[in-house]
Image (spheres, rainbow, N blue to C red):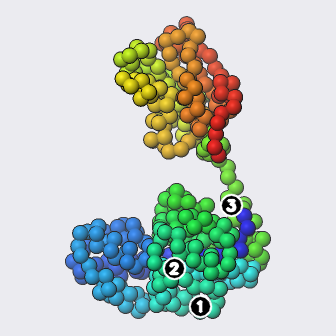
Amino acid sequence: MDIKAILFDLDGVLVDSEKVIGKIALDVFKEEGIDVKEEDLYRFVGGGDRIFIDGISKLYNKELDFDTTYKKINDKYLESEIPLINGAVDFLTNAKKAQFKIAIVSSARKKKVLKNLNALNLGEDFFDLVVTGENIVRNKPNPDIYQYAALTLKVPYENCLVFEDSILGVTAAKKANCNVVALSTTSDSEKLEKAGAMFVFDDFNSFEVFDSQKELIDFLQECTKDERVRYGAVKCFERDYPFSKEILIDNAIKAAFKAQANAYTAYSHYNVGAAVVSASTNNIYSGCNVENASFGGTICAERGAVMNMLSNEGPNGIKILVVVTKDNPPAPPCALCLQVLSEFCKPETEIHLIDEEYAKDKRNGAHEVYKFKDILPKPFILH
C-alpha cells in the first residue's frame, strides 16, 4: 500500500452533520406533506442534494420543487450548530504534518461545505484541494468526484485513501480504484464492508497518532491483515465445529441421502444426492440431480448443493462434500461438477463418496474419502 493523498468526504466523516440534516429534512418534508420515515433518508445519503430530495420525492410519490425544498433545508442547516466527529481535527493535523496531500471531496454545495469547515475551525487554505458538488455533473455513486480530485492533485487513483461514511460514497471511491476506509457514523458496518471498504472504524479516535506517512501506512496494513483462508477462487473465515467431526460428517451423509430420494431422474433413473458443509458456518446444504429433456440443461446434485449454499451465505468455502450414489464403488463428481467445485474447495477439502447401503446403516456398503486435490490435482482457477 502506497498512499500519497487522503480524500475526505465531509458530512458524516469530519463533521457529525447527518443527524442534524436528517432532523431538519424530516421537518421540511413534513411541511411539504410527506411523513418520511427516518430510515428512508439514509438510502440517499452521500449522493448530493438532488439525489437526496428527488429520491424522497419518488419514494413517496409526492412531487417536490427541488429549489424550494433545498433552500428550506439549507437555510435551516446554515443556522444550526454542527458537532464534530471524534478525533477528526487531530487526524487532519497529523495528516498535514505527515505531508500527505489532503482534500475535501464532498457532494454538497459550497455554502454547506464552508459551513462545515467553519465548524472544524479550518479554512479552505488548510487543504490542498476542496471539491464540491458544483465541480461535477454526475454525483456519487459514480466515481467522477474522486477521479476529479485525484487528477487535480496529480496522484494516481490507487495512491489515494478515501474516508467515507455512506454506501454511495464507498461505491464511488471503489469505482475510482481508490483505497477506502469507512466510518460507521451513518451506515451499517457490514453494508459498508460489502460495498468495498477495507475496514470500518467508529471514528478517528481509533487511529494511532502518526508523524509520518510510513506510520499511517503501517497502521493500515496491520489493520488489513487478511485472516481469511483461500478456498479455490474465494476467501472466507473458517469456523471450528463445536462437536466431533464424525457428527458433522454423519449429518452431511443424512442430508445427502435424503436429497437423493428427491432427485428428478425421468431419463436416467440414476439418483444422486450431495451435501456441502460451509467452511464459515458449518451449516449443511444439500442438493439432488435434476434432469432435463434437453440433457444439457441437467443439473448435478453437487452443483445443486453448491448453489444452495451460495444462495444462503454468498461466496464461501466448502469444508466437506458428501456424494451418495447407488454404485459400489461410489461414483465421483463429473468433470463439470469438479470444475464448479474448484471455485469453492481448497486442495484439502474432504470428498466423501458413499453408496446407498452405507448411507442407510454405515455397517455395509462403501465409504471412500479423498482430498479434492486427489480427484482434481490441477484445477483451472482465476484468482
Above-or-below relation of 357 to 290? above
Task: Locate residue 244 relative to residue 19 in the image: left or right.
Answer: right
Q: Earlier in the sequence, mark 1 or mark 2?
A: 2
| Label 1 residue SS | helix
Amino acid type, residue under disc 3 in the picture: Cys
| Classed neighbour count for the residue bearing mark 1: other residues with Cα under 10 Å, few (<14), some (14–19), many (≥20) | some
Choose mark 3 or mark 1, whichever is in front. 1
Q: Is disc 2 placed on a helix, strand or loop?
A: loop
* Quadrant that contains the N terminus: bottom right
Above or below 289: residue 114 = below
Residue sitting at x 64%, y 36%: 380
Vertically, is 228 above or below 329? below
Foreground pick, 119 / 108: 108
Q: Which residue is mark 1?
A: 124
Image position, residue 93 (x, y; %) = 68, 83
Query: Disc 1 marks which amino acid?
Result: Glu
Q: Amino acid at mark 2?
A: Ser
Q: Which residue is mark 2?
A: 106
Nearer-N-terminus badge (2/3): 2
The residue at the point 34 percent across, 88 percent down is 71
Q: Residue 245 appears in which quarter of the rendering?
A: top right
**Element marked by disc 3:** helix
Label located before the other in sequence (3 or 1): 1
Near mark 2 (Cα within 10 A), the count class, few <14, some 14-19 or many ≥20, is many
Q: Is residue 189 left or right of residue 50?
A: right
Q: Are marks 1 and 2 in contact (CB under 8 Å)?
A: no
Q: Label 1 vs label 2: CA separation?
A: 13 Å
Q: Is residue 370 above or below residue 20?
A: above
Which of pointers 2 and 3 indicates the residue nearer the eye?
2
Distance CA(mark 3)–CA(mark 1): 31 Å
